[in-house]
Image (tube, helix red, strand yellow):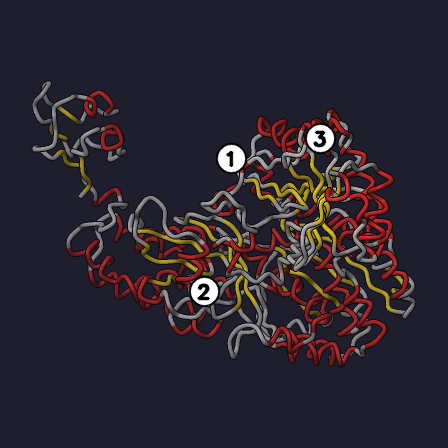
Amino acid sequence: MKSLEELRAIRDKARSQVILRENNDNAIRVLVGMATCGIAAGARPVLNAIVEEVAKRGLQNVIVTQTGCIGICQFEPVVEVVAPGQDKVTYVKMTPEKAVRVVNDHLVNGNVVTEFTIGANS
Amino acid sequence: MYRSNVLVCGGTGCTSSNSELIISKLKEEITIKGLDKEVNVIRTGCFGLCALGPIMIVYPEGSFYSRVTPEDIPEIVEEHLLKGRIVKRLLYKETVVDDNTIKSLNQTPFYAKQHRVALRNCGVINPESIEEYIAVDGYSALGKVLTEMTPEQVIETIKASGLRGRGGAGFPTGLKWSFAAKNQADQKYVCCNADEGDPGAFMDRSVLEGDPHCVLEAMAIAGYAIGSTQGYIYVRAEYPIAVKRLQIAIQQAREYGLLGKNIFNTGFDFDIDLRLGAGAFVCGEETALMTSIEGKRGEPRPRPPFPALKGLFQKPTILNNVETYANIPRIILNGADWFASMGTEKSKGTKVFALGGKIEHTGLVEVPMGTTLREIVEEIGGGVPNGHKFKAAQTGGPSGGCIPASELDVPIDYDNLIAIGAMMGSGGLIVMDDTTCMVDIAKFFLEFTVDESCGKCTPCRIGTRRLLEMLDKITSGNGTLEDIDRLEELCYYLKENSLCALGQTAPNPVLSTLKYFRDEYIAHVTEHRCPAGVCKALTNYHILEDKCRGCTLCARNCPVGAITGSVKVPHVIDTKKCIKCGACMEKCKFNAIIKR
């Protein structure tokens, strides 16, 4: 170890491994529907794409987690974004590519991707 | 990139209830389900709630599963990790609210009142990974002192924080460091006392098992502060998991250049070696510990000279306890004021207690100084189980004293505990209920000190033996009131004349039980009666005539044939034949057998 910068670089790299374990009530929660319907429709690659993109962007205030069936199985894979103090946004018929866009536009820049939401697709 | 972290407790408690098997089964099931790239399984240190082990937490949800068995693993993997459905039947019941929602672990009674400083990383990081320790700001306190602070500033910070030794005596840590810093020598040493010997204490073990790097970092900081380049950790060989994780941690720190030569390119050299103790209680005493590190028989020597002047190998040495070190990095990073804002006027910060004995939540708790014993026992510890009544709590193990129910509301700090005849000790807290005989407890601790007395000084070697003989006489019903007076007199003699703290504190359990439970001693001598019904020689079993149905169950179970009687006629115990094993009382379905 030769400098504080070197230590900081290791810390920042390792941080993504432990950040999941912090209780953060102010975090944005991303819920991926992972009931049988969701998994059958391809929710798993969507979930992984979100996890990877969040890590790539270094977003520390985002929790990606699974949830069950919310009852709109024809629209699976469903991804919901719940930010504190804001209305829940429900994205439907997701793909890994769409998911990456949601992370970048919505989570990073704060712009809801209206064209993927349930309102634009039903 | 992992989307989920599964933390399984790998502390000694959970390991002994099979957490290793759970980890391997978990990894196996996760691989079968193809989740091995998504879910990371981590073995951590102790979570504190040992009574509910084996313990597992799944993040990001933070689901706290307790008493997990290997058979539960396929369900957890299938339901929770694959499908995202939390397995509610395995959740710690305090985290499940009536309306079926789940609250965070920090809101449960066991954790809500705790404040974790020394245990901050236990149960959070993987103790065998230096990267995870660095991720939670590990080694940045060492970086800060080496690049931004002078040794004097480090000592001033520790002094200002008000940190006192957590090994039991409560000597101000900063002051200790300043003495060693002032004494000039070609070599100085930094030692860590990890020879945790009190029966019922396991705080230091848990820190070493859960967060070994924080002790290494703190020792390097101490080395910089006093001008030392070599540290020794004296850890008992009975702690194999702690020893293994320390070895791994030292190796990793050397690889990363956080121990060794020219750390942070500042010209500061520091290295640490382990020394394993063979488990002698006296080696927890500082002079005996250093004698043992030198390779000699672990015996204490008179002080002065104090270790700060002539310690290990006759060189200036500081010796601190594991928990003391565990506080140091946080004090450096958060500042002395932050630390001093916790606790009472003369005892700052937090203290870890190992809860044991007759208590619902056996485990490890860390609370701010000044928390009352009632809060620890009743709120955090969940109270005394099986409807029994709290009688007393023993702090400080065989060197400490008991705190009776009348003193439950005293705020716990170093000075208050001494004022009521107990002591902080290293943090063992053994709870006793109304089925405990206080004379018997004093005898239990005396048996321990008799075994552990090193034999070097006469007051301790012979005095503790005589004390035990007197207690034996009292508990066997042959004592007199004069024996109680003589017992007390000898206690004070030992306190004043023993060479080291072992002998000086050995009478404490006797003195404090005499202070608060003298009536029990008197009942043993004058009435030949043990009020708690523990002392065998003074207890007789009787059958209550009106309750006995003559079922013959007791007579059939008596190993010595002391019970006689015909079917459907009340039975009788021949107290001369009875060996007081209690088998009849256990078997009786009508509560017809009593002890008195």
Label 2 sits on residue: B505
Q: Viewed as shown, does residue B562 lie left or right of B503?
A: left
Label 1 – label 3 distance at C-alpha: 31 Å
Q: Residue furthest top?
A: B567
Residues at discs 3 and 2 in contact (Cβ within 8 Å): no
- Which x, y percent locates residue B517? 27, 61
Label 1 sits on residue: B89
Task: Tell me the SS state at disc 3.
Answer: helix
Q: At label 2, which amino acid type do we have?
A: Thr
The quadrant in which residue B522 appears is bottom left
Task: Tell me the SS state at disc 1.
Answer: helix
Q: Viewed as shown, does residue B122 lie left or right of B467?
A: right
The quadrant in which residue B548 appears is top left
Label 3 sits on residue: A74
Q: Is residue B418 above or below residue A8?
A: below
Q: Viewed as shown, does residue B52 lie left or right of B229?
A: left
Q: Which residue is drawn at the image coordinates 43% and 64% (left, top)?
A: B459
Q: Is label 3 on the same chain as label 2?
A: no
Q: Which of the two residues, B249 or B446, is positioned nearer the viewer here?
A: B249
- Which x, y percent locates residue B87? 57, 35
Q: Which of the two residues, A104 or B557, is positioned nearer the viewer here?
A: A104
Query: In this orientation, does residue B292 appear?
Result: no
Q: Is residue B262 above or below residue B110?
A: below
- Determine the chain carrying the residue at label 1: B
Work out which quarter of the rendered image holds the C terminus of chain B and state it.
Answer: top left
Q: At label 3, which amino acid type do we have?
A: Gln
